[in-house]
Amino acid sequence: MNDIAGFAVAPDAWALQLYVAGQTPRSLRAVANIQRLCAGQLKGRYRLEVIDLYQQPQLAQGDQIVAVPALIKRLPDPLRMVIGDMSDAERVLHGLDLLSE
Amino acid sequence: MQLQLPKSATGIQGLDELTGGGVPQGRPTLVCGGAGCGKTLLSMEFLIHGAIRFGEPGVFMAFEETVADLTQNVASLGFDLDDLVARRLLALDFVRIDRDALAQSGEYDLEGLFVRLGHAIDRIGAKRVVLDTIEALFSGLPNTAILRAELRRLFSWLKERGVTAVITGERGSEPGALTRQGLEEYVSDCVIVLDHRVIDMVSSRRLRVVKYRGSTHGTNEYPFLIDETGISVLPITSVGLQYQASVERVPSGVVGLDAMLGGAGYFRGSSVLVSGTAGTGKSSLAAHFAAGTCRRGERVMYFAFEESASQIMRNMGSIGIELAPWVESGLLEFHAARPTLSGLEMHLATMLKEIVRFDPQVVIVDPLNSFVTVGNENDVKMMLVRLVDALKLKQITGLFTSLTLGGGALEQTDIAISSLIDTWLLVRDMESGGERNRGLYILKSRGMPHSNQIREFSLTRQGIELRDAYIGPAGVLTGSARLAQEAQELAVQLRREQEILRKQDELSSKRAAMEAHVVAIRAEFAAQEVAALAQIDQAQLSEQLLTQDRRDMAQSRMVEAA
């Protein structure tokens, strides 16, 4: 968990969205996990938006949400999605192209 | 009172009939089958009919086809999905999961799908839901254990929401498995299996209700069609021997033939088979019947499997049967197709569909046994049973022609279907004296007195004419032999008449001779009589004289003695 793709990016270069469904323990766990991960790996370079589908169900179709919690990497390209409670940090980083093989 | 399971009509012709009203209301139904079997179309029709005809808006969640594809596919069937969406009668949602761009970290659930579906249901007040094909999730999302648990939850959630759902599934490769992921374990209320087989290069589609909890249903495989009006299922095997037998008679269109059939023709709603070798006039008999029926203002549907409609009309025109005007006036409809075009079931399905649409009083199938090239004889028989039953149920008179091959016994080829036939006409060619002539006889005709005679029939410019049969020592005389026989009989008759005249002449001259003779005898008698009378007179005179003499003598003796 140490090789972060080292390229120069603007502070807002990482745009992430975390979709959850309600304040379930799994949702809360996912939010906490991703916040911790971003604070550690993307400090000052990311913007995280947490969306509760119970509050905004109309977003599910447009963003192709099926499984939750779902983390979507909008920026930088390409678009990536990680599903689950984000408990496996290595897999999250993999999924976000933050960790090379 | 019997408690009836509430059902949601699918609006698909035939399917509601065989399920007794549709799929279970408020419960999920599984529709499964192989690729291209029509499950997407069936489920889409379920929604469209629900929206348009039953006032039940629906949500279509597609996992394999995009909204654009779906819209385009059903547009060819005349359904405008965009319009239904705009009128909030339909909601379309294409669920796409990009496996390559997806990773899993920890546990997840499908609550996103639930929210998405629930939102769509709420937005248009949907009563119906289709998930097509939800198994695609298994290839898109990791961890099948989670998916299975979530699908189980999804189906009970759908029940809780009270929506009538159709879930499609791809047929599994393992024998006995209806779907790849065993969806039938979760959806246990109603399971419908679609099948699309190709046998001998001919394709046929079939549908079977494998399971319907709490309801009776047809368990057979039913053929179904996909055509320009969508799906239609034909639950034809459900008809039995319950039909009403009519006493009404329909003329055969040939005067002489009606006379042979108890003087009135066929029974309405009966099945008539005309069998015979090639070129014996089977189609002509059929055309006569068609024309006669149209003339009475009734409708005829003519299924031709060997000739095109225009060819039939041209040929029949040559023997004075004009069919074209009836086609123009809409009383006669031709359906010409090669038997090999599709499978037996498909033919039957198409025919019944057309019959239901056109509602004819007479159906002609010409010829029936072209189907032997498609199916085996048993299949053909099964098909005919269904067709005959369906026709009888609707009181439609069916006339089928059947080509028998030369050589074998004429009756033999058709023996398999004989039991279904009420009136069986046999046309045959009779060869004698270097000629080939046509003969017709009634092999059987249920429920009416009928002629046992073989009648010769000829095709003239005015149509079929039946002639009296001449039975000679060598059998029935036809053609020239018949003409010779007719001439011979005429000669014999003439001779007889002349003989009588001669005898009469002879008699009268004999009488004249006799009478002359009598006159002569009488004259002779008269002459003799005169002579005899003269002699008698003479004798009497002599006697008197003698007596006088004697008296005188005695007197004189007494004088002498004294």
Image (cartoon, coloured by chain):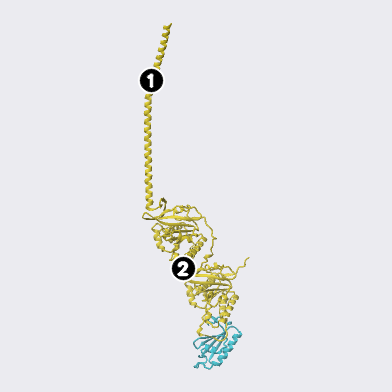
x%, y% of residue B112? 56, 81
Residue B429 position (above or below residue B151): above
Q: Is residue B194 in view from this perspective?
A: yes
Residue B308 position by quadrant = bottom left
- Compared with B255, A35 (above or below) is below
Provide the chain ID for the residue under circle 1. B
Nearer to us of marks 1 and 2 is 1
Q: Residue sitting at 38 percent across and 38 percent down?
A: B504
What is the x, y in percent for residue B80? 49, 73
Among the two numbered marks 1 and 2 on one chain, the one whose residue lies closer to the N terminus: 2
Q: Chain of mark 2?
A: B
Crowding near the residue tagged with mark 2, few <14, some 14–19, many ≥20 C-alpha atoms within 10 Å: many
Query: Which residue occupies the foreground of this view, B311 or B370?
Result: B370
Instruction: Please identify which colour was used for chain B in the image.
Output: yellow
Q: CA distance from mark 1 to mark 2?
A: 122 Å
Q: Which residue is the site of mark 1?
A: B535
The residue shown at (37%, 55%) is B435
Query: Can the viewer see residue B360?
Result: no
Residue B446 percent location from the top left of the image: 50, 56
- Point out the residue furthest to the front here: B561
- Quarter of the image where one finds residue B150: bottom right
Q: Amino acid at mark 1?
A: Gln
Instruction: Spot the residue most to the right.
Output: B1
**In what element is the residue under mark 1?**
helix
Q: Quadrant of residue B548?
A: top left
Q: Amino acid at mark 2?
A: Gly
Return the residue nearer the eye: B420 or B322.
Answer: B420
Which chain: cyan?
Answer: A
Please rate how many residues cluster around mark 1, counting C-alpha atoms within 10 Å: few if below 14, some from 14 to 19, many from 20. Answer: few
- Residue annotated with mark 2: B343
Q: Image check: B105 left or right of B407?
A: right
The reply to the same-chain question for discs 1 and 2 is: yes
